[in-house]
Image (cartoon, rainbow, N blue to C red):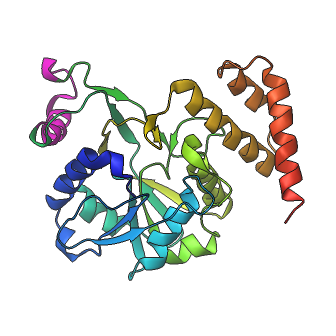
Amino acid sequence: MYSPDRQMALETTISCLKDMEGYQDCQKTLIVDGDVNVVFEGWDYIRVPRVRGDFCWADMWEAGVASARHEKIIYLDSDRLLPPVFLPLMIESIKPKTFVFTSVHFVMLQEIPIPQCKQLFETFEERGFADEEFLGLVRYEPRFKDPVHGPGKNVMSGSVGFTKTDYYRLGGVDPWYQGHGAYADTDFHFTAQVGRCHFVDLQLPEFHFPHPKRAGDGKLGLMELRRMGLKNYIYYLHKWGLPMNLAENVAIECNLRRPAKYVEVVLKEIKEAAKEY
């Protein structure tokens, strides 16, 4: 899954994938949000239009799964760096009613060249990050195996293996979630748990390559991103019958003048929109 403003991240991701046993044997498809501005040998390309104007997680996932010619599917964001053992171990671990991921997730705090990115795996394996060369370069941000009804990385965040059968059995990703506000992955994670799926943790290091969040030609600020996420979070809580005061707590961090009132208004809009279907 790729957005054109993340070309360096994608090039680094694919360079890491090429080091993995089985890479040449896989069907490889780049699901693109926007114009295709890269070409890689052996890759197919699917451009997904923004039908409703905003980025839609469900449309991107659906394009990838529907185009897959095999039962086992590995979904990867274009900014996730994984060690050489990842691909063969992932393929071996994918079973029916199982989602395979890795919890050992690190956010990279700066862009570094591809050779140095690959060195991260060796350094982690040998010494963790005690080496001075890597101090301040990464921040640990684990992905949670069990669903957490709030902000955070989870099984469906960025790299996960599953079967095509299970994806459609669960109904896929909810198309309501729009924009950079996420929670589509949180929702699908909980859907999979309700659907009696198992979550297998490979416990391999995963490095999240840095990139800005953008809308059109402009970079989105922290408060804009938080408010986008808040709208999706309110829908998530309403959908699953969870306490709405959880959203009010998040709203306080969004610099809103009346957080509780904002949640009330958005919830009303969601309920009114539901009546139209």
Q: Where's residue 45, x and y in %?
A: 33, 70
In the foreground, 229 or 51:
51
- Res 100 seen here: yes
Residue 196 location, quadrant: bottom right
Outermost residue to the bottom: 69
Q: Where's residue 95, x and y in %?
A: 44, 71
In the foreground, 42 or 173:
42
Which quadrant would the C terminus be assigned to in this image? bottom right
Q: Where's residue 112, x and y in %?
A: 18, 33
Residue at 25% in and 71% down: 43
Q: Is residue 121 above or below residue 89?
A: above
Magenta-drawn segment: 116-133
Along the horizontal axis of the image, is 147 left or right of 238?
Answer: left
Q: Is residue 33 above or below residue 170?
A: above
In the foreground, 161 or 13:
13
In the foreground, 120 or 38:
38
Residue at 42% in and 32% down: 141
Q: How many marks?
A: 0
Along the horizontal axis of the image, is 23 left or right of 223?
Answer: left
Residue at 37% in and 60% down: 35
Q: Where's residue 174, x and y in %?
A: 65, 60
Q: Is residue 28 above or below residue 113?
A: below
- Res 243 seen here: no
Outermost residue to the left: 115
**Predominant secondary structure in magenta?**
helix
Along the horizontal axis of the image, is 170 left or right of 206?
Answer: right
Indicate whether residue 105 is drawn in magenta. Answer: no
Residue at 57% in and 47% down: 179
Which quadrant would the N terminus be assigned to in this image? bottom left
